Amino acid sequence: MTRNAFGHLIVDPTTLHYSQRIDELRRVAGRLMADVDRGSQWAGAALLGWLQCGGHFEDTLGIRPPRGSRRSAARLLRAMQQDDALLRLATAIGCDRQALRILRGAECPPEYQSLRDAALGLRVPTGPHAITRARRRDRERGMTRALQT
């Protein structure tokens, strides 16, 4: 038994047989396409198109970096995570310079240690303009985030 009475998958999808995993991806694509969010519809259509035609998934999604570029999806996501960690720390501390000092080894108040550790774990840049650049990239991406401390 792989589904409950409501049709929801109740087992780990990696334990399914190959054809069952393909069918599950088809179901997920259908649910995404039925969503009112345009991004979900796009992802669902791309997933279904890839299942039907094959090929490289990056090409189907239209996210393959240009030839010779190092700006892969993984690198961009990591840069966004680094920017987010920098901005969270700077917002919590209330001073960009002090946040950078803390990242470079100055004493960190206990209430900010988890934010500092998260930023250092992501190997954020600590140059004099790191937070300014993170803010600029964040604005350029057009993302609005609620920075929580």
Image (spheres, rainbow, N blue to C red):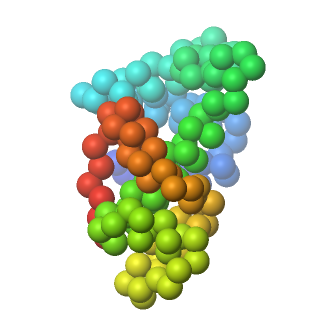
Outermost residue toward the bottom? 110
Residue at the (63%, 30%) spot, across then down: 71
Q: Is residue 84 above or below residue 22?
A: below
Pick the residue in front: 83 or 78: 83
Given residues 87 and 81, the one toward you in this image is 87
Residue at x 31% of width, y 24% of height? 38
Position of 13 with respect to 70 (left or right) is left
**Can you name the residue that lies furthest to the right here?**
68
Visible in this render: residue 3? no
Left/right placement of residue 130 relative to residue 17 reads left
> Residue 37: which quarter of the image?
top left
Q: Residue furthest top?
A: 53
Image height of 21 relative to 86, above or below: above
Image coords of residue 51 (percent x, y): 60, 20
Expressed as whole percent of the image width and height from the top left, the position of residue 26 reads 51, 28
| Res 146 → quadrant | bottom left
Left or right of 144: which side holds 68? Answer: right
Residue drawn at x 45%, y 19% as measured from the top left = 45
- Which residue is rendered at x = 45% and y = 59% of the image? 86
Residue 124 x, y percent position in the rendering:
57, 58
- Please identify the quadrant where the C terminus is shown: bottom left
Q: Is residue 62 left or right of residue 71?
A: left
Q: Position of residue 94 (x, y in %)?
A: 29, 68
Q: Is residue 108 visible?
A: yes
